[in-house]
Image (cartoon, coloured by chain):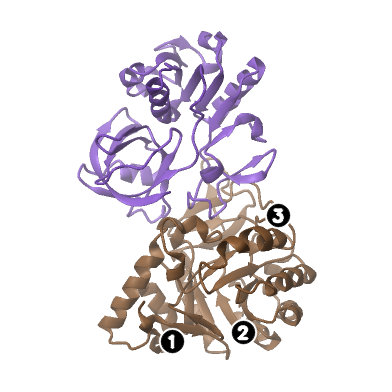
Amino acid sequence: MKYQKELVVFKKEKLNPACFLLELKSEEPLCEILPGQFVNILVKGVAERLLRRPISIHDVDYKTNIISLVVQKAGLATEKLSLINEGDKLDVVFPLGNSFPTEENHPLLIGGGVGTAPLYYLAKTYYNKGIKPTVLIGARTEDQLFLIDKYKTVADVYFSTEDGSIGEKGLVTTNSIMNGSFSAILTCGPTPMMKSVADVAAKKQIPCFVSLENRMACGIGACLCCVTDTKSEGNVCVCTNGAVFDSKELCNM
Amino acid sequence: MDKRLNTTVGSLKLKNPLLTASGTFGFGTEYEDFIDLNSLGGFIVKGTTGEKREGNPYPRLAETPSGMINAVGLQNKGVEYFCNNIYPQIKDKNPNIIVNVSGSSIEEYCKVASLINDLPSIPAIELNISCPNVKKGGMGFGVNKDMAKEVITEVRKVYKKHLIVKLTPNVTNIIEIAQAAELAGADSLSLINTILAMAVDAEKQKPLISTITGGLSGPAIKPIALRCVWQVSHNVNIPVIGIGGIMNARDVVEFMLVGASAVEIGTANFINPSVCTQIIKDLSDYCDRHKLNSITELIGKI
């Protein structure tokens, strides 16, 4: 079941020059939300951007009925969204999409840039099941990271930065943690990064699940705009068949 | 149900003037979490072709001022799949489920139309001779009055129920095409399909969609759509269904005033999946404010 609800902006916090945290509170109890799912937010008042903005879910707190998002200012609508005030209401459709696998016994989670956001809820899900996952975060520099202490409460966290300002210098694929033994890699980030990660996983002969962020109009499988080409089914909607896919299924991964 | 909102399109009796536009509403079931499908006047399912089509490569979408451009290219699983797998699931969801029929050749249009003709719970088809996103056929039939006449004449022979013909605005004289469609046996006309358009990424110096050109929809095209509906409705003797950037009840009223007997809601469904519920409520309020006994009193006042 999907819902369209008015959620209240409970908290807004700047995380770094590009990203901000949004906590959205529901007056009613939240439905079950899976790690890797996303919300579709209506940002009013931008004539050039009529469509909703799909944003991955960073965290869910069922006690307070709060969904947390990390939003990157990437265009006119997210810029406008960054100006919203605590107490304002947002029209949100959720939860959308499938889920990352949550049954791995030794998963490696790899995030790049703002793609790291959904991995917190994923790591927390594993942690609550008694499995402390490994999280590898890639960024250009240390000041692009966000909420690191929070990730450390539920996972063993490693870093790769292009300038070496934190963790190992270089790309995530060359991080020494990649030499470890894992049951699967679950990743979200820029497509070139996810491609190289999928290559490493293939060499290690372990599954790799990637989260795509194709341009969407509806988010509910109606418009067929956000498709990705798959080996077994041809073009499928990222919003309903994904956003998480087994990398081996994708033609361009 | 507010009986003042009842309207008709030829033999089709609608509980209100709202249909949903093909390609924006999936097979209806995608929207069931958000609206009661039976509250709509009807809904028009995704364009269906003779064989399965993969559609165009990604990216298929670009956002533009007050609108969007799409180039989906009729991705669908083909008419047999629709009849065997989709139809049984949706047939009782609304009395006016309409199938949008597309093709690359007259034979393909006729094949789809004749198979849909056998489905008892589908009272009408919308013949799509106006899709701008396929290489062969599609809009090719809708921009030439002789070709339009030919395909409609042939489909008319195999399709016995209500035949809606969907027109493209990408023509020099839409009245001429509309009249040819009427003459060839269309029971009603729906217009407008999307407007051929393009969007460019100045930074990457590349087109924003894979096919370079696509179809523009949304509020940006509403003034053009109103003009087309007004021109056509005053020059044919069959009902007209208005389409183009309708976002709210006020837009519906505008289309009815220029001659539409019903309307199709398209892009607005993407922005607000429950928009039709709101529009139906607001149309009742409009009837209250303007003391209308029937919304049909508006049709063609301008």
C-alpha separation, residue under disc 1 versus residue under disc 2: 17 Å
Of residues B254 and B156, the one nearer the viewer is B156
Q: Which chain carries label 2?
A: B
Does residue A3 appear to the left or right of B165 in the view shown?
A: left
User: Toward which corner of the image does residue B6 lie, by quadrant?
Assistant: bottom left
Q: Is residue A249 visible?
A: yes
For disc 3, the marked residue is B53
C-alpha separation, residue under disc 2 versus residue under disc 3: 28 Å
Helix, strand or loop status at disc 1? loop
Count neighbours of disc 3 (C-alpha within 10 A) and say few if under 14, some if 14 to 19, many if 20 or more: some
Helix, strand or loop status at disc 3? loop
Q: In which quarter of the image is the C terminus of chain B?
A: bottom left
Chain ID, purple in image: A
Q: For the residues tagged 1 and 2, is the chain the same?
A: yes
Q: Can residue B167 be seen in this view?
A: no
Q: Which chain carries label 1?
A: B
Helix, strand or loop status at disc 2? loop
For disc 1, the marked residue is B299
Quick check: B167 above or below A206? below
The residue furthest left is: A87
